[in-house]
Amino acid sequence: MHEHLLSRQELEALLKPDPAAEAGSEQARKLKVVLDFPLELSVRLGNATRTIAELSELAAGAVIELDREIGQPADLIVNGEVAARGEIVVIGENFGVRITSIVRPIERIEQLRQEGSS
């Protein structure tokens, strides 16, 4: 489905320091390669759980209540992982997300390592 996206293992391999490489030049090349890859971004306003029967009864105009209240932050999801939180804004006729907090990169890498080892 998203064959152009890096797997967690590929991303970790690209970011892993290479002691045999010349100081900086090989790492800079690897970083440039990673920076050019597209990432899938999505925003999660909240979650809901419904049965298949409930979903089959939905019709146009139905409302599904989410588990968050108005004013709570939305999650910015990058390749399936929460990378930041923010508030929904309107830009012209489009919606956007104003980032209010970012998950530190080291925390994201640790999350990937923990998922890879489980």
Image (tube, rainbow, N blue to C red):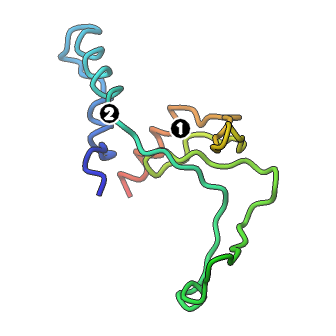
- Which residue does the image show at 68% across and 37% down from the upper left? 92
Question: Mark 1 to mark 2: distance in Å?
Answer: 21 Å
In the displayed orientation, state which residue is furthest to the left: 20
Residue sitting nearer the eye, 91 or 65 = 91
Res. 6 mark? none
Q: Residues within 10 Å of mark 2 (few under 14, many from 20)?
A: few
Spot occupied by residue 102 in the image (x, y as percentages of width and height): 62, 34
Pointer 2: what residue? Answer: 37
Residue sitting nearer the eye, 83 or 99 = 99
Pointer 1: what residue? Answer: 107
Q: Relative to residue 94, is residue 101 depicted above or below? A: above
Looking at the image, do the residues carrying marks 1 and 2 touch, with CB atoms under 8 Å apart? Answer: no
- Which residue does the image show at 32% across and 37% down from the upper left? 12
Tell me which corner region of the image, top left, top right, bottom left or bottom right, holds residue 30. top left
Q: Is residue 55 left or right of residue 20?
A: right
- Which residue does the image show at 30% across and 47% down from the upper left? 7
Q: Is residue 1 left or right of residue 113?
A: left
Query: In the rendered view of the protein, which quadrant contains the N terminus?
Result: bottom left
Given the image, on which type of amino acid does mark 1 rest? Glu
- Which residue does the image show at 71% across and 34% down from the upper left? 100
- Please tell me which of labels 1 and 2 falls first in the chain: 2
Q: Residues within 10 Å of mark 1 (few under 14, many from 20)?
A: few
Q: Is residue 61 left or right of residue 10?
A: right
Spot occupied by residue 16 in the image (x, y as percentages of width and height): 31, 29
Spot occupied by residue 27 in the image (x, y as percentages of width and height): 28, 17
Q: Relative to residue 18, is residue 78 depicted above or below? A: below
Q: Secondary structure at mark 2?
A: loop
Q: Is residue 109 left or right of residue 70?
A: left
